Amino acid sequence: MATTVDSPTDNNNLATDASPVAERATRAKATIDKHESILFKIKLQDATGKHVPVYEVANKTIGFLCAAGRYSACQELATLIDQFLESNPDFVIIYISLDQSVEAFNRTLAAHPRWLAIPYNEPVRQDILNEWQTKGVPCLHVYDPVEHEIVTSWGGSCLRFNAERCMSEWKKGREGVSYLQIVLGWWYYRAPPGVYRDMSDLELVNSGFPSQESADTKKNK
């Protein structure tokens, strides 16, 4: 089933889209010293516990993953993240642990050696959860270190339902997944085998799912 509903790429806009990306790369190094950047407030470590300077992620798109390794939903998203990291070297994960102990934190990182993390005993972990109003786990906040802002808190849905295109969308400041993709995607994700999975988007709409127009209307209300 095709769940991607974005408009086809317009080749005439490629040059326009490329300019902001190039400017972003040029500006990235300079932004690390600005007080408004969340990177100014945190320390980082790798999966072995080694300190990692924050400037190493200054030109990356960053996923702040709020999760706990003991939950199956977090484990499922972690698998999707590891697959995404394989094909997207400009994306980096910073783990914000809700594990119950430093031992559990270390086990989670050991299972995902590509991840970086805020050290377990850093109080800023809770400050970030409160500031970004993180109400449940797993939650993947996608952060632009150049603009100093959260691009989307729907990072998990982006990886589930629009993994091939969300990275380019994030670099343009977009959320990376549409409301309709989430609605259709969750049905596809949970449906029993053979139920709706081979239907086109039009056939799904005819079966009672919202159209792109109605989905956008609901989202903008």
Image (cartoon, rainbow, N blue to C red):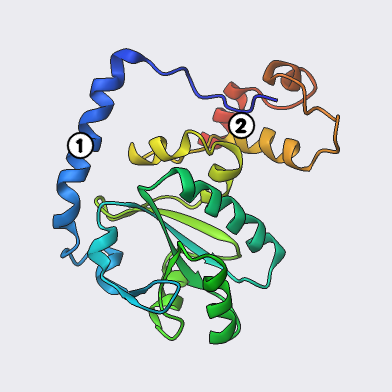
- Point 19% across, 62% down: residue: 32
The residue at which mark 1 appears reads as 22
Across and down, in percent, residue 149 comes to: 33, 54
- Left or right: 149 as drawn, with respect to 31: right
| Label 1 vs label 2, nearer the camera | 1
Q: Earlier in the sequence, mark 1 or mark 2?
A: 1
Quadrant in which the N terminus appears: top right
Quadrant of the image occupied by residue 76: bottom right
Across and down, in percent, residue 56 comes to: 26, 61
Across and down, in percent, residue 81 comes to: 54, 53
The residue at which mark 2 appears reads as 180
Across and down, in percent, residue 77 comes to: 61, 55
Is residue 10 visible in the rendered image? The answer is yes
In this view, 49 is above or below 171:
below
Mark 1 and mark 2 residues within 8 Å of each other at the beta carbon? no
Q: Amino acid at mark 2?
A: Leu
